[in-house]
């Protein structure tokens, strides 16, 4: 199977780069360093018996790069909208990120190609997090802890990514089979 492209988008400071580095088994920065435009991390994932390469396109949360977003989303197979679940009132901004990337031109991603992912950073404590509200509550969503132990954090994020990748791989296989039969 070819390499899969997953765009990781969301508000500034939401943990997108930390998540991508955890999955790539790189050491996340201890201080916040805003992404300037785009960072790409490649990771190997095993879905069933299939090993696949996934390019995680870590897109800047700064809207001054908005003119680049259509090019960044070109040819993407999946979308993760990442955010900090401890910040209230993010739904309208998350919906904007989802709209900007999920519906580019004639391409529209299905719900199973998307994941709304809250990246909780304080080691699991703190106040309970409310479920996502608004239009995005119909999409697969989860809140995972990315504070503390890096390997445990990577496993939690990886499990959520793998759920989405399982659907994407199945859809691509079905599409390939249909194209051969026609």
Image (cartoon, rainbow, N blue to C red):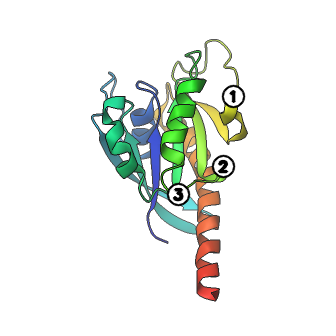
- Asked if residue 9 lies left or right of residue 162, the reply is left
Numbered mark located on residue 111 in the image: 2
Which residue is found at the position 49% from the left and 38% from the top?
A: 151
Numbered mark located on residue 76 in the image: none
Depth check: give the residue in front, 166 or 80.
Answer: 80
- The reply to whether residue 174 is visible in this rendering is yes
Provide residue 149's location: percent of width, then percent of height: 49, 30
Label 2 Cα crowd, 10 Å radius (few <14 / some 14-19 / many 20+) = some
Alpha-carbon span between mark 3 and mark 1: 23 Å
- The reply to whether residue 145 is visible in this rendering is no
Provide residue 50's location: percent of width, then percent of height: 56, 68
Q: Are marks 3 and 2 in contact (CB under 8 Å)?
A: no
* Label located before the other in sequence (3 or 1): 3
User: Is 29 rendered above or below residue 49?
Assistant: above
User: Is 97 rendered above or below residue 71?
Assistant: above
* Label located before the other in sequence (1 or 2): 2
């Amino acid at each position: 199977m070819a390499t899969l492209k997953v765009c990781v988008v969301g508000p500034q400071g939401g943990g997108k780069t930390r998540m991508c580095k955890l999955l790539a088994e790189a050491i996340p920065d201890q201080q916040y360093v805003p992404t300037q435009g785009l960072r790409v991390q490649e990771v190997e994932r095993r879905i069933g018996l299939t090993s696949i390469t996934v390019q995680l396109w870590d897109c800047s949360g700064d809207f001054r790069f908005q003119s680049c977003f259509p090019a960044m989303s070109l040819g993407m197979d999946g979308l993760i909208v990442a955010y900090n679940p401890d910040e209230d009132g993010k739904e309208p901004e998350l919906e904007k990120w989802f709209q900007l990337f999920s519906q580019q031109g004639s391409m529209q991603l299905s719900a199973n190609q998307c994941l709304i992912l809250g990246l909780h950073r304080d080691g699991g404590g703190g106040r309970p997090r409310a479920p996502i509200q608004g239009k995005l509550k119909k999409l697969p969503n989860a809140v995972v802890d990315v504070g503390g132990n890096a390997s445990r954090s990577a496993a939690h994020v990886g499990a959520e990514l793998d759920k989405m990748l399982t659907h994407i791989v199945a859809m691509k296989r079905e599409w390939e089979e249909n194209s051969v039969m026609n």
